[in-house]
Amino acid sequence: MELKLFKYRFPLTCNFVSASHSYAKREGVLLVLNNDKIEAYGEAAPLHGFSKETLEDILKYINQHKDDLRFQIEKKINEGDYLSNHSASSMPDSLVFAIDTLLTDFRAREQQTSSQKILFEKPKSRIEVNATLTLADQDKTLRKAEQLWKKGFRTFKLKIGADFIREKQSIEMLRKQYPSLKLRVDANKSWSYDEAVSNLNQLAPFELEYCEEPIAQSGSQVLSKLRKASPIPIALDESLYQVRQLSHWIERKCADILIIKPMILGGIHKHLEICQEAIELGYSIIFTTALESAVGRGMTAALASGLGSDNHAHGLATGDYFKTDVWEDKKYLKKGYYDLSVESELDHNINFNAPNATIEQIEL
């Protein structure tokens, strides 16, 4: 059994903008575990503005604990286990996610099945995915919307918060053009509380699925107050990762929908516990990537297949942001769905010579 570590840097096709950051490239660490028959993968890619740790923290932790990491991974493989349990340890969350992905992938390949079938008894085989649409120019917006519609997307996520009057006009235009289209908006924390109440009431006639991160204030009291005042469901994304105890945050009922980024949240044990608690409290769970490579996207899709909402599209169609990747996963995106009916992770291996990419091995 051999464990290898690689650091990667992939350029993006365009800057990806969140509430507080803009990303032109993606960096992370790939774990590769192989024996004579199987090669399995995991990925740790902390995202600035979301993750508590940095890439440097990951590399430092691995360097300090490399012997124990290798021992624990090989021990779990030999014992037939596939989930780590480091909830009380100092291991960075994205590294826990990487190890869980690695172990699950190894077990799936060993049994010639898929990760979702290792994790869940009855996972969904197809997961609806959303497309993201900018509203900078109405003509361009309509042309892009038509292209996405023809590809099979039936849920559009709209980035708003720059010019509400113009954005409202574009939303009205889209609603008239595509009456059955599901529309969700992401305000990227751009509004004050009063602005949010006013804007959400103005947007209510367009039957939006939800508004993500409407206000800059992320305290539980103000969000709970806004949720009660809003005619549109409220979703939280980055706010979830700016608190110490996510479980306590969930109990405050500050939103209707939780946007879960597995790379940021950490290990699979944590996902199982938190998502089950949230579902019991009436939340809808939407899974989305944290702009990681196809390795992390595959595990995010696997988790969505077992824990994600059946009534909402999930943010899995983010491979287009990459100029290059470890492998191509577009073939699994079919007519607005991420298709898990094929044993997808068995079909590919990392391309260490991907064009425009930097993938360098780090000695363990």
Image (cartoon, rainbow, N blue to C red):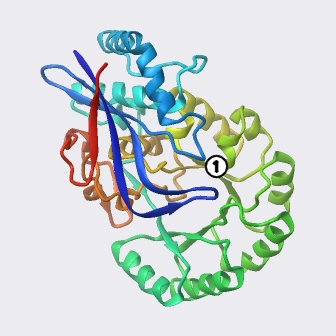
Going 82% across and 71% down the picture, which residue do you hit?
195
Mark 1: which amino acid? Glu
Residue drawn at the location 25% of the way across and 58% of the way down: 331
Residue 279, placed above or below residue 158: above
Residue sitting nearer the eye, 25 or 187: 25
Where is residue 40? Give x, y as percent.
Answer: 26, 30
Q: Judge the density around disc 1: few (<14), some (14-19), many (≥20) Cα neighbours within 10 Å.
A: many
Residue 11 appearing in the image:
yes
Q: Residue at x 32, y 59 (%)?
A: 333
Return the residue nearer the eye: 301 or 166.
Answer: 166
Horizontal and vertical percent position of residue 258: 64, 49
Give the residue pinned by disc 1: 238
Q: Spot the residue most to the left.
A: 36
Going by the image, does 20 lie left or right of 138?
A: right
**Observer-nearest of 16 and 64:** 64
Q: Position of residue 126 (x, y in %)?
A: 37, 53
Whether residue 108 is visible here, answered yes or no, is no
Viewport quadrant of the N terminus: top left
